[in-house]
């Protein structure tokens, strides 16, 4: 469909969003760009409001399943999420279910520059193996 939404076999419905992690000792959030699956009903609702000004006020958060395996963490596929619509031009914000999963903890508690450096090094190592 486009770079932010995807339908597979008219059965699986995905939307692209951002998991934002507060940076404790820096400015701005650390952001993971991810895919989340939605029910057909919620996907259709999201598409109905895709270009509507004020959609972030009109749409309630929607349940979804995280569909991105993020390196540097234990498996992240199928973590429970809530998808929060934001103003036009911004990808939805993805809120993880509050659990003890390290990614969920970092979303709630933040991460430091040392952890960000570790993630960058781990990602470089993953790229080298490919």
Image: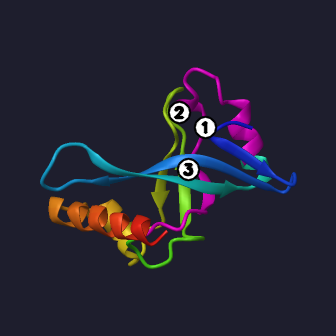
Q: Which residue is mark 2?
A: 56
Residue 68 appears at what percent x and percent y? 56, 63
Q: Nearer the viewer, residue 82 or 14?
A: 14
What whole-number distance in Å separates the C-alpha atoms at marks 1 and 3? 10 Å
Q: Nearer the viewer, residue 59 or 51?
A: 51
Tag count: 3
Category of crowding for the residue at label 1, using alpha-carbon neighbours closer than 10 angstroms: few (below 14), some (14–19), many (at least 20): some
Q: Is residue 28 left or right of residue 8?
A: left
Residue 62 included in the magenta stretch of the image: yes
For mark 1, give the secondary structure. loop
Classify residue 48 by image quadrant. top right
Report the disc number at residue 83: 3
Q: Is residue 6 left or right of residue 33?
A: right
Residue 111 in sight here? no
Identify the residue at horizontal 62%, vertical 58% (top origin).
64
Q: Which residue is the extreme one toward the top?
A: 53
Magenta segment boundaries in residue numbering: 43-71
Identify the residue at horizontal 74%, vertical 55% (top origin).
39
Category of crowding for the residue at label 3, using alpha-carbon neighbours closer than 10 angstroms: few (below 14), some (14–19), many (at least 20): many
Report the disc number at residue 93: none
Q: Nearer the viewer, residue 18 or 82?
A: 18
């Amino acid at each position: 469909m486009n770079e932010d939404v995807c339908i597979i076999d008219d059965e699986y419905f995905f939307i692209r969003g951002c998991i934002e992690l507060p940076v404790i000792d820096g400015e701005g959030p650390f952001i993971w760009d991810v895919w989340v699956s939605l029910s057909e009903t919620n996907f259709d609702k999201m598409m109905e409001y895709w270009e509507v000004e004020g959609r972030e006020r009109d749409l309630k958060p929607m349940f979804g399943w995280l569909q991105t395996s993020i390196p540097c963490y234990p498996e992240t596929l199928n973590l429970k999420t809530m998808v929060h619509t934001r103003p036009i031009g911004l990808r939805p914000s993805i809120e993880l279910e509050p659990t003890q999963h390290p990614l969920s903890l970092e979303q709630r508690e933040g991460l430091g520059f040392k952890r960000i450096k570790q993630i960058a090094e781990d990602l470089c190592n993953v790229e080298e193996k490919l």
